């Protein structure tokens, strides 16, 4: 797994997935935490941060990312295709 946190963008690569939290968009509803409590938690400011992505099954992780009501979590695969939130092929920017 690789880790990269730059300011309000926190990013992890786990398996074939690259997952990014845009903390400027997060409004702290906690849907991601509810879906995958081992992967996400809310920090002191009520904003999502990563915990341990490796311990969460791929499908559960994708469900948690997709649950974000404000699309603060983005997931790409190893081909650079954005899979959460899903984008039509014509809008993909690998
Ligand atoms: S679901 Fe989205 S808005 Fe809610 S805590 Fe997670 S990242 Fe933030």
Image (cartoon, rainbow, N blue to C red):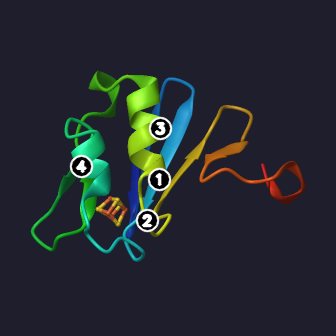
Provide the secondary structure element on which disc 1 rests. strand
Q: CA distance from mark 2 to mark 1?
A: 15 Å
Which of the two discs, 3 and 4, labels the residue nearer the N terminus?
A: 4
Provide the secondary structure element on which disc 2 rests. loop
Q: CA distance from mark 4 to mark 2?
A: 13 Å
Is 79 placed left or right of 70 in the picture? right
Is 45 placed left or right of 89 in the picture? left
Foreground mark, 1 or 3, reads: 3
Please identify the quadrant where the N terminus is shown: top left
Evaluate if marks 4 and 2 touch, with contact meaning CB atoms under 8 Å apart: no
Which of the two discs, 1 and 4, labels the residue nearer the N terminus?
A: 1
Which of the two discs, 1 and 3, labels the residue nearer the N terminus?
A: 1
- Give the x, y percent position of residue 38: 20, 35
Evaluate if marks 2 and 1 touch, with contact meaning CB atoms under 8 Å apart: no
Q: Which residue is mark 1?
A: 20
Residue nearest the observer in this picture, 64 or 14: 64
Kindly tell me whether mark 2's CB lies below 8 Å from ligand 1: yes
The local crowd at label 2, few if under 14, some if 14 to 19, many if 20 or more residues have their Cα within 10 Å, is some
- Give the x, y percent position of residue 35: 29, 42
Identify the residue at horizontal 57%, vertical 26% (top origin): 16
Q: Is residue 23 above or below residue 2?
A: below
Provide the secondary structure element on which disc 4 rests. helix
Foreground mark, 2 or 1, reads: 2
Q: Residue 33: which disc? A: 4
């Amino acid at each position: 797994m690789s880790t990269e946190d730059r300011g309000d963008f926190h990013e992890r690569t786990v398996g074939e997935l690259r997952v990014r939290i845009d903390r400027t968009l997060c409004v702290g509803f906690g849907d991601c935490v509810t879906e995958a409590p081992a992967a996400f938690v809310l920090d002191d400011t009520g904003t999502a941060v990563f915990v341990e992505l490796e311990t969460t099954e791929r499908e559960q992780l994708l469900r948690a990312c997709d649950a974000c009501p404000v699309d603060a979590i983005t997931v790409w695969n190893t081909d650079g295709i954005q899979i959460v939130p899903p984008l039509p092929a014509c809008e993909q920017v690998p």
